Image: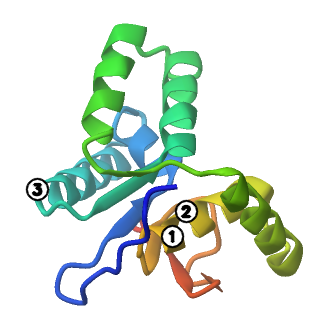
């Protein structure tokens, strides 16, 4: 796991769930696509974007399988997203996510996202898939499309 980083209140880090990155390539939802692109650019330029290995893997799998994005293009996009702060979980992080899963009754994958966000010093996870404004282990879920 990358070392824990404390986010400053002036320039807080935000963790991107996979669905936000996927919307940046999905022309079926132009408003969501533009919002996702704006968020990615804002956090890329501000160096405040955070993803995990899990998010990069899910992104590549989903856009190549469901959106039929060319694998070379998807790989280039993964390279761009990897310029964010990338959390690389260890076994201890998987065990901590299992505890969150059990305690908060969320999916294991969502628990892993929340745990990685917290480890990276994020106060918020940007996600359409989790409950908006829910707080898990001190991390708030924010649906940027609302």
| Residue at mark 3 to residue at mark 2: CA–CA distance | 22 Å
Q: Is residue 31 left or right of residue 15?
A: left
Q: Residues within 10 Å of mark 3 (few under 14, many from 20)?
A: few
Which residue is identified by label 2?
A: 116
- Measuring from the top left, give residue 110's x and y in whole percent: 68, 60
- Disc 1 vs disc 3: which is toward the camera? 1
In this picture, is 95 found above or below 141?
above
Reading the chain from its start, which is encountered first: label 3 or label 2?
A: 3
Q: Nearer the viewer, residue 67 or 43?
A: 43
Q: Image quadrant for the C terminus?
A: bottom left
Task: State the mark number for residue 28.
Answer: none
Reading the chain from its start, which is encountered first: label 1 or label 3?
A: 3
Which residue is identified by label 3?
A: 45
Cβ atoms under marks 2 and 1 closer than 8 Å: yes
Residue at image location 40% in from the left, 68% down from the top: 144
Task: State the mark number for residue 119.
Answer: 1
Residue at image location 36% in from the left, 73% down from the top: 5
- Measuring from the top left, give residue 84's x and y in whole percent: 29, 50
Q: Residues within 10 Å of mark 2 (few under 14, many from 20)?
A: many
Residue at image location 24% in from the left, 90% down from the top: 9
User: Element at badge 3?
Assistant: helix
Asked if residue 114 shows in the view, the reply is yes
Quadrant assignment, res 46: bottom left
Q: Is residue 32 left or right of residue 109?
A: left
């Amino acid at each position: 796991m990358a070392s824990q980083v404390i986010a400053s209140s002036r320039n807080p880090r935000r963790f991107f769930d996979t669905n936000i990155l996927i919307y940046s390539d999905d022309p079926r939802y132009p408003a969501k696509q533009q919002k996702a692109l704006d968020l990615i650019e804002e956090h890329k330029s501000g160096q405040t974007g955070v993803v995990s290995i899990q998010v990069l893997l899910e992104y590549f799998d989903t856009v190549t399988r469901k959106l039929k994005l060319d694998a070379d293009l998807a790989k280039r996009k993964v390279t761009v997203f990897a310029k964010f702060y990338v959390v690389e979980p260890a076994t201890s992080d998987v065990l901590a996510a299992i505890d969150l899963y059990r305690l908060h009754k969320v999916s294991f994958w969502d628990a892993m996202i929340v745990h990685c966000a917290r480890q990276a010093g994020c106060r918020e996870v940007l996600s359409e898939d989790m409950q908006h404004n829910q707080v898990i282990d001190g991390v708030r879920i924010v649906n940027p499309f609302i």
